[in-house]
Image (cartoon, rainbow, N blue to C red):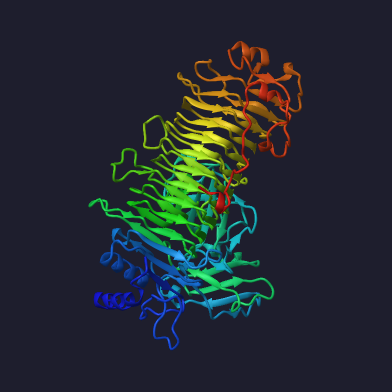
Amino acid sequence: MTTLRILLVLACAWVPFRAAAETRFYVDPQGRDSWSGRRPTALVGKADGPLGNLATALILARESRRLRPAEPVVIQVQPGRHELGAPLDLGPEDSGITVLGANGRVPPTLSGGSRLTGWKRSEKNHDVWEVTLPEVAAGEWYFNQLFVHDQRVQRARTPNTGYFRTTGPLSKGTPIQMAFKPGDLHLAWAGLPDARVVMLMKWTDLHLPLRSIDTEHHLATLAGGPRGDWMDEPDARYWVENVPDALDQPNEWYLDRRTGRLQYWAAKGFDPDAVPIVAPRLRELVRWRGDAAGQHAVTGVTLKFLRFADCDYEMPEAGLMSPQAAVGVPGTLRAHHATDCRIVDCRFENLGGYGLELGRGCQHWLISGCHFHSLGAGGIRLGEPGDVHPSEVDANHSHRVLDNRLLQLGRVFAPAVGILVFQSGTNRIAHNQLRDLYYTGISVGWNWGYQATPCHDNEIDHNLVETIGQGRLSDMGGLYTLGPQPGTHIHHNIFRDIQSYDYGGWGFYTDEGSTGIVLENNVSYRCKSAGFHQHYGRDNVVRNNILAFNTEHQLMRTRVEEHRSFWFTNNVVVHDTGTLLGSNWGGTTNQFWMDGNLYWDVRLKGDATAYRFGTDTWEAWRARGQDPHSRIADPLLVDPQQPELGFQRGSPAYALGFRPIDLHDVGPRPPGARK
């Protein structure tokens, strides 16, 4: 659209609207970019009406801001599906613009995909529908995901459930070689352009093209490498995706890059003309691009009542060895050098990567009341992993992440984290629900060791973190911290049902160098490895928490250091399986200190002589100076299935100074209760 055209539209549009307190542009899937966009519906005769393209509305809104900087500008997106041809780029000139969905109950969809039509039944199998996509055959388009009726469907994989197992460690060099069991892999798969091995290892996953297969020696050659020894896992689990033989059950699809033929095995009675089938074209939807060199940030942009959907992820030709937290997978909405922006009551669904990424130079954002669902990676990323000493302009800090729901994450990249905080401080993460992930729920601070970082004074409270891990990966926590974090306060959270594949399913996990953190008034229960584990750290405070019915151990401590690792005081620990203490409890009261706690092993009842604190008896443990004022007694839980409900009146925990934990409003609050 030319500048003259923009000025004419604005001049004409303002004539009947001079008394308005704001300028408002409307966008509708049935609109036209030749219209003014100042009317929500088309006039009789279609002389004027809403715009048809959000990008055009943004150009007009930008010009309006330039001409009348004091007048607010709102882009109102009408209900329906808006397919974006390219990501929306927001620069400093877009500061102050609001993009608003017209209907808060059914938000308009900003889609990064295209609806596919022209389906025909396969002649070989009438449950399989086919369509040929010339752009794919021409090398102009490829996609890794497919969404049917707003649901991600499985790319054809084998085995359909469970895993194949390697028969030995992967080779160390490049390319990688994998030993497989006879019959698991087939020679015909070798060299297919998009045959992919997906492998799980400890806290990582590998997505590697299958290059060749030696059926005599049972060795497969994969793209990619080298990799660190720390990734190795005996008898590693894997499956194979996007080979024709794997298309063998409903709700699977296969795409042949060479011919452009897409096949989808549907349920009985499926009608592809009645149900939308969408393939993604974009990997990003919105980008905030401030000018770091000129110190001009994007400021005051608000997105509200919008749905972001149908985006893909990038897969390099050599594949991807996803590190911890899938840190190499970016957000679908990405920002740098953007301040005081708001994303409120929006939905992030069916996306290939992380939902939202606030990177370098992002400060004072509000993310509130949003719903993150069915994402390839995690929900929200704050900060940059390597920004240990950022400038004032580049620093990331002071965000509020409140009252959001983050469900069904890590659907492509299992190591992804629900809410991931890198080198970012003075944030508040509160009243969120995180459920159904394969790795850590909330991870804060990315520094291995005691080097000072900008990650400090974060407050994490009133979050419900549940159903984490689900036996997919290892070494995870409902809450996971790294490095010094002075002033960080973690309180009034529930962490439950953290189940790792092998080791390391913990409620709260203070890992390498975690320092200066206060964890209090939390409940951690039904975790595989322990309710609390400190690998190594300094001067952390763990007090007034409930740790209940964790499976292998209740508390774990790994490394003995000269300084004090933590204080563990006024906590209630109750269990009916495993041991009380796991791993390494050597050292003196100068290296860790425990007191004022209440312990109860349901199996042992009140027999104090049967209790073991590591290798120590109760008497020997106290002789070491630990737990001098603690007790062994039944805490009288109101409901052992829901320890967060607390204790009955007269519980001995209260006599030890335990304070009741009020968790009535944990998780997202109703809109009227949010502050």
Residue 259 horizontal/vertical position (percent):
48, 75
Q: Residue furthest front?
A: 19
Q: Residue furthest top?
A: 623
Name the residue nearer the viewer: 22 or 561.
22
**Which quarter of the figure has residue 643?**
top right
Residue 438 horizontal/vertical position (percent):
57, 48
Q: Residue furthest left?
A: 294
Query: What is the number of callouts on the image?
Result: 0
Q: Residue at x 44, y 44 (%)?
A: 227
Res 171 visible: no
Q: Residue at x 61, y 10 (%)?
A: 623
Residue 188 horizontal/vertical position (percent):
55, 65
Q: Is 301 displayed left or right of 116 in the figure? A: left
Q: Residue at x 40, y 67 (%)?
A: 75
Q: Is 5 displayed left or right of 321 in the figure? A: left
Name the residue nearer the viewer: 437 or 322.
437
Q: Residue at x 60, y 40 (%)?
A: 495
Q: Is 632 displayed left or right of 149 in the figure? A: right
Residue 365 horizontal/vertical position (percent):
41, 50
Instruction: Indicate the quadrant containing the N terminus: top left, top right, bottom left or bottom right.
Output: bottom left
**Which quarter of the figure has residue 84?**
bottom left
Judge whether 213 appears above or below 603 on screen. Answer: below
Judge whether 441 appears above or below 130 on screen. Answer: above
